[in-house]
């Protein structure tokens, strides 16, 4: 067998007439920490629920550690630890009781379970609260209990749905470091909408938007894209529609995108192929094409902008583009 | 089997972790006390027959109260997602939770034992029918619990689960009062479906396997439907 631990092929999930997932495919190799990034409602949780066998896909297949999530869901579930979104726990149990309960359900023999619980309590820093009722714990500690629950059977695969959301920055950093630590010898999928977390903790990033995967890259790759400059051009409205095509014709321009503009103006965003400064050639192109240049600037892009571009602005921009096309 | 018992134990203990078990047991015993001793001295016979009639009525609100949270609450808080993504069969979850509730029913019935014991000290009590009646109440209660866990699997709202189970149990309990108003063929069926028909014959001390089978079938059917309802989340 290869070292692919999680493989999803063309997952589609429809709720009545809402499409939550639209042909999502991915594969995660052994030892990889995969960041699953996307705005709320993009389909992160749905994908994770399918992988953890909580719901079934409408179409498509997924295998986890070689077990099909439909055909052999018990086998798949055995090799996974899962921390659902919002980390639901039984408030009436003591931390210790909860971990014992999970260990029993996971069929860990009693003696072994005692040892494991000891290790896991140490590892997750639950030492001074394990005899407390879960309802009395702070959110940070609850998150640790959730992680301990997911780790107690030492699964080769961990699926964590927004493990750091709702924590204060200090707690978030602690949990993130913990996950990084845990992830050294495991395959981890971790979903979040926080880019900084992904940069620190993950080897690879999938960005999902409107049920589709829109980017699959390393954090470095994303940062490289983020490091590229972009050029913002503001023109007086010409009405001849030549602006976009003339910029596209420029050497060194990878993509031109129309942005929203105030009335009487047109705004474009130009992404360069390399790292050269295109300002002078943009100016000359404007003059040559009889366009009145009102503004021209070079901006660095950060991860947030790329994320927005891939998840939010894409749908808006494409509909805006359609409108522009219809108008011309 | 081992996992089923783990879940059963967890549910059983959970009743005592909160006030639920204490409230239910206290209320049950207080009401029993009020309604049992009053007619007892009027009848002036060493019998606990009224006690079991009383119990069947008290179980109507009690059983749904015990089961309403079993699945509904897990769905509302989301813990069901942790539970069902562990290597557990849905049947193990349903049966485990059911057994936990049945465990509390047993505690409830055992806590009424002082009644027949004190009656037997007052006069000669025939323990045969008493034991048969205990079996009858146990089967009736277990059936109501199974219906309760079914309605709990339909909703995230404990109150809805409670009232739906209460209504179903009440309907099955009272349906034979309407026998004179329905056509003959239907009347037989209605009578057979009713709790009372099977319960009363057992209270008389006659343990007919058909009556036992009736209760066991309703339990099996309810649990099977609850299992299907839980499983439906994984239908394509």
Image (spheres, coloured by chain):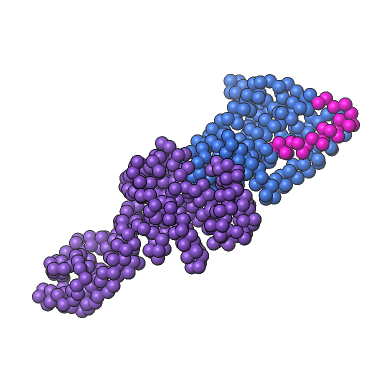
Q: Is residue A129 above or below residue B195?
A: below
Relative horizontal placement of residue B209, taking residue A308 as reference (left or right): right
- Residue at image point 67% right, 30% down: B139
* Picture coordinates of residue A89, whole percent (x, y): 56, 52
Is residue A194 shown to the viewer in this render? no
Q: Main secondary structure of the magenta part?
A: helix
Q: Is residue A98 above or below residue B124?
A: below
Does the magenta run of residues contain A79?
Answer: no
In the rendered image, the residue lying farthest to the right is: B122
Chain shown purple: that is A
Residues shaded magenta:
B105-127
* Picture coordinates of residue A233, whole percent (x, y): 21, 74
Chain B visual colour: blue
Relative horizontal placement of residue A203, taking residue B173 as reference (left or right): left
Q: Along the line of sight, which residue is nearer the eye, A207 or B173?
A: A207
Is residue A65 shown to the viewer in this render? yes
Q: Is residue A141 above or below residue A28?
A: below
């Amino acid at each position: 067998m290869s070292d692919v631990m999680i493989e999803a092929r063309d997952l589609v999930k429809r709720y009545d007439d809402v499409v939550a997932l639209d042909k999502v495919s991915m594969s995660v190799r052994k030892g990889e920490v995969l960041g699953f990034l996307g705005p709320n409602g993009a389909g992160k949780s749905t994908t994770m629920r399918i992988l953890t066998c909580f719901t079934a896909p409408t179409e498509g297949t997924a295998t986890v550690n070689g077990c099909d999530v439909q055909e052999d869901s018990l086998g798949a579930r055995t090799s996974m630890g899962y921390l659902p979104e919002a980390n639901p726990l039984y408030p009436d149990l003591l931390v210790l009781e909860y971990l014992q309960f999970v260990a029993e359900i996971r069929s860990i023999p009693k003696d072994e379970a005692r040892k494991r619980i000891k290790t896991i309590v140490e590892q997750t820093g639950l030492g001074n609260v394990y005899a407390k009722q879960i309802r009395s714990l702070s959110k940070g500690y609850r998150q640790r209990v959730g992680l301990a629950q997911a780790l107690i059977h030492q699964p080769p695969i961990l699926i964590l749905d927004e493990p750091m959301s709702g924590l204060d920055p200090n707690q978030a950093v602690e949990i993130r470091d913990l996950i990084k630590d845990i992830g050294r010898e495991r395959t981890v999928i971790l979903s979040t909408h926080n880019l900084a977390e992904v940069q620190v903790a993950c080897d690879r990033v999938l960005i999902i938007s409107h049920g589709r995967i829109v980017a699959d890259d390393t954090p470095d790759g994303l940062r490289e894209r983020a490091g590229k400059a972009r050029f913002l051009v503001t023109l007086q409205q010409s009405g001849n529609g030549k602006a976009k095509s003339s910029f596209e014709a420029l050497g060194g321009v990878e993509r031109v995108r129309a942005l929203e503009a105030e009335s009487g103006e047109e705004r474009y965003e130009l992404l360069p192929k390399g790292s050269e400064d295109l300002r002078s050639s943009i100016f000359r192109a404007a003059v040559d094409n009889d366009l009145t240049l009102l503004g021209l600037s070079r901006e660095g892009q950060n991860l947030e902008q790329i994320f927005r571009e891939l998840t939010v602005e894409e749908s808006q921009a494409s509909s805006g583009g359609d409108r522009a096309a219809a108008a011309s | 089997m081992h996992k089923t018992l783990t879940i059963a134990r967890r549910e059983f203990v959970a009743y005592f972790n909160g006030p639920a078990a204490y409230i239910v047991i206290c209320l049950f015993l207080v009401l029993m006390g009020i309604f049992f001793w009053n007619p007892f001295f009027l009848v002036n016979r060493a019998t606990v027959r009224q006690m079991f009639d009383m119990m069947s009525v008290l179980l109507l609100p009690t059983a749904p109260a015990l089961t309403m949270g079993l699945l509904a609450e897990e769905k509302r808080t989301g813990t069901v997602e942790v539970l069902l993504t562990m290597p557990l069969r849905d049947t193990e979850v349903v049966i485990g939770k059911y057994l936990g509730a049945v465990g509390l029913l047993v505690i409830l019935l055992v806590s009424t034992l002082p009644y027949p014991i004190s009656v037997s000290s007052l006069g000669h009590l025939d323990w045969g029918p008493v034991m048969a009646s205990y079996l009858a109440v146990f089967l009736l209660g277990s059936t109501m619990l199974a219906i309760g866990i079914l309605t709990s699997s339909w909703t995230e709202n404990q109150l809805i689960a409670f009232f739906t189970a209460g209504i179903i149990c009440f309907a099955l309990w009272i349906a034979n009062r309407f026998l004179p108003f329905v056509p003959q063929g239907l009347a037989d069926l209605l009578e057979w479906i009713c709790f009372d028909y099977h319960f009363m014959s057992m209270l008389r001390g006659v343990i007919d396997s058909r009556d036992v089978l009736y209760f066991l079938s309703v339990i099996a059917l309810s649990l099977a439907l609850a299992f299907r309802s839980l499983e439906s989340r994984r239908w394509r």
